[in-house]
Image (tube, rainbow, N blue to C red):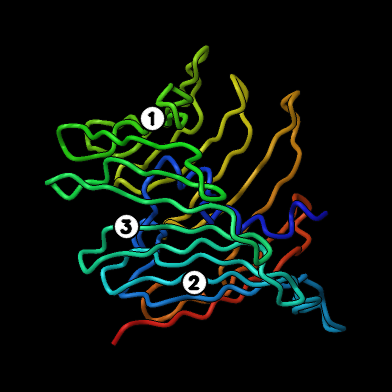
Amino acid sequence: MKKTVFVLSLLLYISWANAQNILVPTAKEDNLCGKIKQYISQSYEATKDAQGRIVKGDYLGRKLQTYNPLGDNTEMSSYGSDGSLLKQSLFMRNEKGQLLEMCRYAYDIFQAVGYSKYNEKGQLVQTDHYREGKKDDWVRHTYNKNGKIAESTQYFPNDTFRESVSYKYDKHERLVEIWNITRTQNIKAVSYTYDSKGNKREMIRYRGDKIRSKTTFNNKGDISTFTSYNEDGSEDDYRRYEYPSYDAHGNWTECISYDRNDIPQRIYIRSITYYD
């Protein structure tokens, strides 16, 4: 099924909609260790050879992410099996790593641009988005007393309220809930749980008052399982992930996904380049 082709890539790829409301994740927040310069993740159909070994089948596409020396994300791009660009987000930053401008492309077509503003504390406080040369909306970011992002509020060009995203933390300042706030509703969108050592173990996405998807993580912080659900609560899709190999920095370089019947579905090969 087409929707399952890039499940892992989609989980690791921040969408433009999210980029409007939360800060672009750093290499550390992407669960990457070491001074990452870039990584390329290539996806393949999983199949078995005559000896029953899991091997690469048809090529499905690749994903590229680049980072500056501070660990800030500077590019996120995905390509189809024919090498064509599917989508791309570029993040222009200053020497402090502050996000100055971000551009989005889809199928080589420019879609939108965003410009950022910072306060005297170096916190991102506003992002203005433009489409076809016209202001599309703008987002104001506020922070709690500990410097964690507390709320991102989106406005129409005429400054009227559009929607808001609220971030809730536990006593250890770990993100535990994300809420979507509209003119008529206040709905939990995402929740996170952690183990006794502070490692993230589960992420649940909601659709209204129902669970939309559930993601679990292993001891290294990598995705262990992903389950999506239909409107009636029945299971829609399930994937389990194994990581046969890691590099010297502790980042995975190969991943295999399996369905509910333990049949291999996809193979992901990731090559990582580090700063010296």
Amino acid type at mark 2: Trp
Please tell me which residue lies in front, 84 or 186. 84
**Looking at the image, is mark 1 or mark 2 nearer the viewer?**
1
- The residue identified by callout 3 is 99
Helix, strand or loop at label 2? It is strand
SS assignment at label 1: strand
Q: Position of residue 113 (x, y in %)?
A: 47, 53
**Within-10-Å neighbours for mark 3: few <14, some 14–19, many 20+:** many
Residue flagged by tag 1: what amino acid is it?
Thr
Mark 1 nearby-residue class (10 Å; few <14, some 14–19, many ≥20): many
- The CA distance from mark 3 to mark 1 is 18 Å
Quarter of the rendering containing residue 259: bottom right
Q: Is residue 2 left or right of residue 26?
A: right
Report the amino acid beneath label 3.
Leu
Q: Position of residue 8 (x, y in %)?
A: 61, 58
Q: Are marks 1 and 2 in contact (CB under 8 Å)?
A: no
Q: Quadrant of the C terminus?
A: bottom left
Which dot, 3 or 2, sits closer to the camera? 3
Is disc 3 in contact with disc 2, using a CB cutoff of under 8 Å? no
For label 2, the residue is: 252
> Which residue is located at x 83 percent, y 54 percent?
1
Q: Return the x and y of residue 87 as percentages of the image width and height.
A: 62, 61
Residue at 77% x, 76% y: name it.
Answer: 82
Ranked by sequence position, the earlier of labels 1 and 2 is: 1
Alpha-carbon distance for marks 3 and 2?
Answer: 28 Å
The mark that comes first in sequence, 3 or 2, is 3
Q: What residue do we see at 29% from left, 39% from top? A: 174
Q: Is residue 75 above or below residue 276?
A: above
Q: Position of residue 165 (x, y in %)?
A: 42, 30
Mark 3 or mark 1, which has the lower sequence index? 3
